């Protein structure tokens, strides 16, 4: 550790001349104590992660967790906020073990709504718009009232419900009375049978009315509430509710306007996930399908609106047919969009990443850093702590470089890795100069 410290002191400290390429001769000229320890202490790059994490600093806490000392074990700290674009974070990680499809070239794509969670909302019976309860852009919860229409069909159904309930009550009482009279031998059995038939009919009619109300979008509880109201209110104000939680993206409602079932009055969409539709060439379709059988095919998505951000997605579907003119298949990438940065209609660029087995790891070039003439990456050790790990570097292609020395599945810092490097180095230099 002190050796590293010393070498960096030489390379980074302003008191030092040009950085030495060979640390050993430089060490002889330098202050003796640091040089003496230098030969004894291996670099953090050569120390197993569990040993680095077990080290305890002069403050008697684990070195990696000490804000003053963690650089000694090559550890950098980066909380989740540094990975969250909404909070100004500029870092990103990826799991080692994916390789870009198609030689790393981006494909063009378009952001679309998640069509499984996007719907034009309209009333289930014709009526006049009487109240609008949500603004454009509003986030609504499932079941929230979006607007209300005055509907004569709805008013009729409400009245029919109360009438059907009354008829039911009467028919039940009649059956009870006829049974009693029959037992007292006052009335014939025929009267009981007739009363029971009338009860059956009343029950069927009530079921039909409840069915109509359910078809207007009411829940069982609301139907019970209508009953509790008792006297039929003359209001035919029918609430139109959100079928799921989402955001109001379009609204073409005006008070007093006629509204019909099927009208595109209000577009509600759940934008927490969006679809990014891209294409792959015929020759790549098989590769994507095979990769899907091995594991998840991930994707990185960029849009020109946020050139500094990379969004991560998963390939959900590969089109079953090829477009004749272009010989391409449509691919749907699902991207988490919790901050609603991605908007339907945006043009995007997509890079598909297919999982590969051990030995074939590739990382974006920006993930691989150099220090002391050695290549390394920052790998998540635990929580917000990232540790430098040495890698061997192979060929480079289209911004991706083949690496060895880390396990498939390791979480590696890609974008912004240089920030963690300079953080570690700055601390080391600071410590070196202060001595
Ligand atoms: Zn400490």
Image (tube, rainbow, N blue to C red):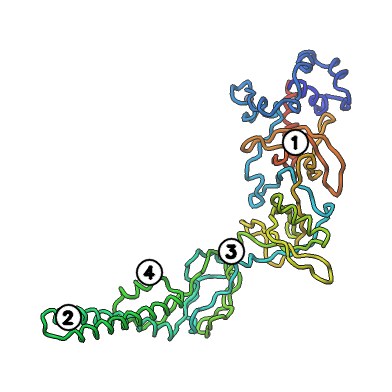
Q: Which quarter of the picture shows residue 229?
A: bottom left
Q: What crowding class fits label 3: few (fewer than 14 Cα within 10 Å), some (14-19), or many (20 or more)?
A: many
The answer for how far apart the CA atoms under marks 2 and 3 are is 56 Å
Tell whether label 3 touches label 2 (CB within 8 Å).
no
Circle number at residue 270: 3
User: Can the viewer see residue 91?
Assistant: no
Q: Is residue 128 above or below residue 351?
A: below
Circle number at residue 177: 2
Circle number at residue 406: 1
Q: How many marks?
A: 4
The answer for how far apart the CA atoms under marks 1 and 2 are is 86 Å
Per the image, label 3 sits on a secondary structure element best described as: loop
Q: What crowding class fits label 1: few (fewer than 14 Cα within 10 Å), some (14-19), or many (20 or more)?
A: many
Q: Is residue 177 above or below residue 273?
A: below
Q: Nearer the viewer, mark 4 or mark 2?
A: 2
Whole-percent x, y for residue 196 in the image: 25, 81
Instruction: Answer left or right for 127 relative to 367.
Output: left
The answer for how far apart the CA atoms under marks 1 and 3 are is 38 Å
Front residue (pair 34, 203): 203
Quarter of the rendered structure image containing ligand 1: top right
Instruction: Answer left or right for 194 relative to 74.
Output: left
Q: Residue at x 82, y 24 (%)?
A: 10
Whole-percent x, y for residue 302 in the image: 75, 56
Q: Is residue 243 above or below residue 432?
A: below
| Mark earlier in primary sequence (3, 4) | 4
Tell whether label 3 touches label 1 (CB within 8 Å).
no
| Mark earlier in primary sequence (4, 2) | 2
Instruction: Answer left or right for 20 relative to 63.
Output: right
Q: Which quarter of the picture shows residue 33?
A: top right
């Amino acid at each position: 550790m002190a050796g590293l410290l010393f070498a960096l002191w030489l390379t980074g400290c302003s008191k030092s001349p040009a950085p030495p390429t060979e640390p050993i001769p430089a060490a002889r000229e330098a202050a003796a104590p640091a040089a003496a320890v230098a030969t004894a202490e291996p670099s953090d790059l050569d120390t197993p992660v569990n040993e680095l994490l077990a080290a305890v600093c002069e403050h008697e806490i684990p070195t990696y967790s000490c804000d003053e000392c963690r650089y000694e074990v090559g550890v950098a700290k980066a909380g989740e906020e540094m990975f969250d674009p909404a909070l100004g974070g500029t870092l990103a990680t990826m799991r080692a073990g994916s390789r870009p499809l198609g030689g790393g070239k981006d494909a063009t794509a378009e952001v679309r709504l998640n069509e499984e969670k996007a719907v034009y909302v309209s009333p289930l019976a014709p009526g006049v718009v009487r109240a609008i309860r949500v603004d454009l852009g509003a986030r609504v919860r499932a079941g929230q009232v979006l607007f209300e229409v005055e509907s004569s069909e709805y008013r009729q159904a409400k009245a029919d419900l109360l009438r059907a309930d009354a008829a039911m009550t009467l028919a039940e009482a009649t059956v009870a009375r006829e049974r009693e009279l029959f037992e007292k031998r006052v009335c014939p059995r025929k009267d009981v049978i007739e009363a029971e038939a009338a009860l059956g009919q009343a029950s069927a009619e009530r079921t039909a009315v409840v069915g109509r109300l359910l078809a207007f979008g009411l829940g069982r509880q609301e139907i019970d509430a209508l009953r509790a109201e008792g006297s039929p209110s003359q209001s035919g104000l029918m609430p139109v509710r959100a079928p799921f939680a989402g955001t109001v993206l379009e609204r073409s409602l005006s008070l007093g306007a006629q509204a019909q079932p099927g009208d595109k009055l209000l577009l509600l969409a759940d934008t927490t996930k969006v679809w990014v539709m891209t294409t792959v060439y015929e020759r790549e379709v098989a590769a994507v399908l095979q990769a899907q059988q091995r594991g998840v095919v991930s994707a990185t998505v960029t849009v020109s609106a946020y050139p500094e951000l990379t969004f991560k997605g998963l390939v959900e579907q590969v089109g079953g047919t090829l477009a004749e003119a272009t010989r391409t298949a449509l691919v749907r990438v699902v991207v988490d969009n919790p901050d609603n940065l991605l908007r339907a209609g945006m043009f995007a660029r997509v890079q598909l990443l297919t999982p590969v087995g051990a030995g074939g790891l590739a990382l974006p070039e920006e993930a691989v850093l150099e220090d002391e003439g050695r290549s390394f990456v920052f790998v998540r050790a635990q929580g917000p702590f990232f540790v430098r790990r040495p890698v061997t570097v192979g060929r480079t292609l289209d911004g991706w470089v083949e690496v060895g020395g880390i396990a498939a599945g390791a979480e590696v810092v890609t974008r912004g890795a240089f920030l963690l490097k300079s953080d570690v180095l700055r601390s080391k230099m600071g410590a070196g100069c202060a001595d």
